[in-house]
Image: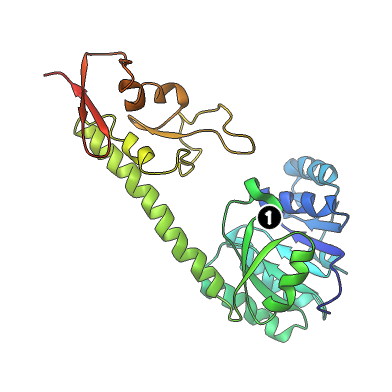
């Protein structure tokens, strides 16, 4: 079974991640089917079916029809639905089939999923997705966990996936992702709060310090910011979003930052003095 190539794949949940994976895998000549609860929704059905046709993925009317005959079943549903999907799939899958759970849920939830497969002949493997799917698509880094992770990993690599094995225990990969997210998102939140505090104290340009001490492109900001730049960034990358006077700003606003002030440019508004500090330049009104 370990040497047999994967030819048929079922994707449960055809949202952003599922749609990308389905399109990428189908483009490699694999037979891909998908099931999504929106196929049963009158309002969304037409758009979802059109999406599957564009991706060259077969739309299935039921979960059973979707997973029948698939060597690999990938679950990319919402976190609230992940447990129910695993439970139902454990009843439908048989020997030789792998269930790979992509969903961002707690280690305890992954362990509960694995418990459903203890009475099934199918193999459960957890996957922790360690980056956003859209930029890297099929090459997004995956941490695998579970008894069958070592058996599945080379087969996933053979179809273009980027996998590493975290542990033969269920929950370790998800714990790594969870703790990593706490650190990364915590630092992002701390940076935003620090810039808001600096602005309240009159240090309107102190946000530039975060850019000076970090990589040139700041991708941490979320697209919910209303002033996110719509200008394209570097080839293959996302738009430039920089730390500015009131948080993230676009390139036009960045032109009035200390980088421009140091070259002699003066931002609009009251006359200002550039006060040089150890790590940055802070602009404040002349008293």
Question: Measured from the top left, where is residue 107 in percent x and y?
Answer: 52, 72
242 in relation to 3, above or below: above
Of the pair 198 and 258, the residue shown nearer to us: 258
User: Residue 210 at x, y = what percent?
Assistant: 35, 41
Q: Which of 214 and 139 is in front in this view?
A: 214
Q: Nearer the viewer, residue 97 or 190?
A: 190
Q: In which quarter of the image is residue 255?
A: top left
Mark 1 crowd level (few <14, some 14–19, many ≥20, 10 Å Cα): some
Q: What element carries label 1?
A: helix
> Residue 252, image x and y in percent?
45, 21
Q: In this view, does 47 lie above or below 136?
A: above
Q: Is residue 179 left or right of residue 42?
A: left
Compared with 196, 231 (above or below) is above
Q: Can residue 57 be seen in this view?
A: no
Question: Can see residue 212?
Answer: yes
Q: Left or right: 115 with respect to 223?
A: right
Tell me which corner region of the image, top left, top right, bottom left or bottom right, holds residue 96: bottom right
Residue visible at 32% across and 49% down in the picture? 190
Q: State the residue at coordinates (73%, 55%).
A: 37
Q: Which residue is drawn at 50% across and 68% down?
A: 176
The residue labelled by disc 1 is: 139
Q: Identify which residue is drawn at 78% across, 83% down.
A: 121
Q: Say left or right for 56 vs 81.
A: right
């Amino acid at each position: 079974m370990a040497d047999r190539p994967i030819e048929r794949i079922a994707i449960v949940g055809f949202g952003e991640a599922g749609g990308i994976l389905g399109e990428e895998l189908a483009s490699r000549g694999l037979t891909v089917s998908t099931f999504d609860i929106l196929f049963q929704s009158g309002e969304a059905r037409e758009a979802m079916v059109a999406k599957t046709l564009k991706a060259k993925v077969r739309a299935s009317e039921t979960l059973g029809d979707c997973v029948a005959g698939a060597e690999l079943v990938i679950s990319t549903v919402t976190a609230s639905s992940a447990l129910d999907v695993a439970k139902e799939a454990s009843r439908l899958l048989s020997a030789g089939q792998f269930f790979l759970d992509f969903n961002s849920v707690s280690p305890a939830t992954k362990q509960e999923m694995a418990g459903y497969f203890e009475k099934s002949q199918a193999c459960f493997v957890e996957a922790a997705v360690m980056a956003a799917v859209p930029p890297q698509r099929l090459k997004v880094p995956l941490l695998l966990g579970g008894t069958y992770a070592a058996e599945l990993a080379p087969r996933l690599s053979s179809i273009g996936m980027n996998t590493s094995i975290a542990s033969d225990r269920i929950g370790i990969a998800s714990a790594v992702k969870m703790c990593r997210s706490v650190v990364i998102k915590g630092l992002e939140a701390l940076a935003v709060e620090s810039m808001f505090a600096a602005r309240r104290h009159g240090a309107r340009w102190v946000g530039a310090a975060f850019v000076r001490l970090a990589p040139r492109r700041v991708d941490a900001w979320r697209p919910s910011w209303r002033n996110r730049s719509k200008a394209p960034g570097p080839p293959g990358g996302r738009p430039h979003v920089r730390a500015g006077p009131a948080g993230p700003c676009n390139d036009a606003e960045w032109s009035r930052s200390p980088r421009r002030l140091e070259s002699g440019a003066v931002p609009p508004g009251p006359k200002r003095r550039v006060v040089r500090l150890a790590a940055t330049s802070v602009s404040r009104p002349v008293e």
